[in-house]
């Protein structure tokens, strides 16, 4: 009883532990020279960069899933067996999702501008259809 | 930046540092950090000499030993060297992520 306290497990030498971790750091982009000869703290920054890269990839995959979901929703009206003849799929998104606040604001501004122009065109068409008497000097 | 010890000796600047390669070289030559308790008189000069491998690889051992003899405040120097020696290994160990299960600890010195 308690012999595990008397006979400690064999310890790995520092070199063995360095070699155990070496493949991982090679896989995340460190060179042989950086790992063995450069500043020993470089590994921390490589790990942090690796975490950032993983997070970015995860977000990218999530975004791809969202686009696929939107595409499926758009075609869903024609996908079911009892769809009426002539049923058409909904249009797919006309532009990618905005990724920044500025991009989102630009899209909103462009949309408002297009709405205003459409309203103006409709109003002008309506005004022309009334055949109102023209003021002097106007043709 | 990794821990370093710098000093000037006879008009020349020296930088002591441990890289993984220098620790590997030392261990290949028989250095065992655990011996620091059992055989301090042998281990400590070897630890000091190993710290030259990173930046002054081709210095002769007798030149390093001469510098070691002249070094002041050896107790603190060796403590710093031991910290430096552990740094390349410690850097490979990740801190656990923040959560409620982590154990906080303190020391009384």
Image (cartoon, coloured by chain):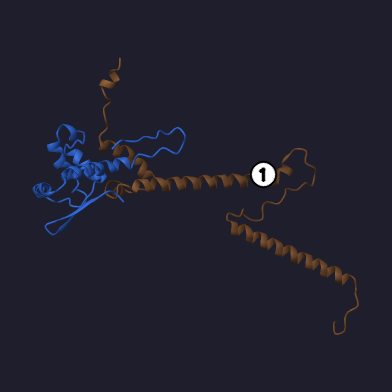
Name the residue located 9 percent from the left edge and 49 percent from the top edge: B66
Q: Quadrant of residue A131?
A: bottom right
Q: To which chain does the residue with label 1 belong?
A: A
Nearest the viewer among B105 and B32 is B105
Residue linked to disc 1: A72
Vertical position of residue A85 compared to residue A6: above or below: below
Q: Quadrant of residue B50?
A: top left
- Chain coloured brown in the rendered structure: A
Q: Quadrant of residue B11?
A: bottom left
Hey, which residue is sitting farthest top in the picture? A1
Name the residue located 70 percent from the left edge and 47 percent from the top edge: A74
Vertical position of residue A115 compared to residue A56: above or below: below
Which color is chain B depicted in?
A: blue
Name the residue located 19 percent from the left edge and 41 percent from the top edge: B26
Q: Residues within 10 Å of mark 1 (few under 14, many from 20)?
A: some
Give the quadrant of the N terminus of chain A.
top left
Q: Position of residue A27 (x, y in %)?
A: 38, 44
Q: Position of residue B72 (x, y in %)?
A: 14, 48
Give the quadrant of the C terminus of chain A.
bottom right
Hey, which residue is sitting farthest front in the picture? B108
Image side of residue B72 versus residue A26, left or right: left
Hey, which residue is sitting farthest bottom in the picture? A137
Q: Position of residue B15 (x, y in %)?
A: 21, 53
């Amino acid at each position: 009883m308690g012999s595990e306290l008397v006979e400690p497990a064999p310890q790995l030498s520092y070199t063995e532990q360095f070699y155990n971790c070496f493949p991982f750091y090679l896989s995340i982009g460190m060179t042989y020279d950086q790992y063995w000869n450069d500043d020993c703290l470089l590994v921390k920054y490589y790990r942090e960069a690796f975490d950032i890269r993983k997070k970015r990839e995860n977000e990218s995959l999530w975004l791809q899933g969202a686009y696929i979901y939107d595409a499926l929703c758009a075609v869903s009206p024609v996908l079911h067996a009892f769809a009426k003849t002539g049923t058409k799929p909904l249009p797919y998104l006309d532009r990618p999702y905005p990724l920044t606040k500025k991009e989102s604001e630009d899209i909103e501004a462009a949309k408002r501008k297009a709405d205003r122009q459409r309203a103006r065109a409709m109003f002008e068409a309506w005004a022309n259809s009334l055949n109102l008497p023209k003021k002097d000097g106007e043709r | 930046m990794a821990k370093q010890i710098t000093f000037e000796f006879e008009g020349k600047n020296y930088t002591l540092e441990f890289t993984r390669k220098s620790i590997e070289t030392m261990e290949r030559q028989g250095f065992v950090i655990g011996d620091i308790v059992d055989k301090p008189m042998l281990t400590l000069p070897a630890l000091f000499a190993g710290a030259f491998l990173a930046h002054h690889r081709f210095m002769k051992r007798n030149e390093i030993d001469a510098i070691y003899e002249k070094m002041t405040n050896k107790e603190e120097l060796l403590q710093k060297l031991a910290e430096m020696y552990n740094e390349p290994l410690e850097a490979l160990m990740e801190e656990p992520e923040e959560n409620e299960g982590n154990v906080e600890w303190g020391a009384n010195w």
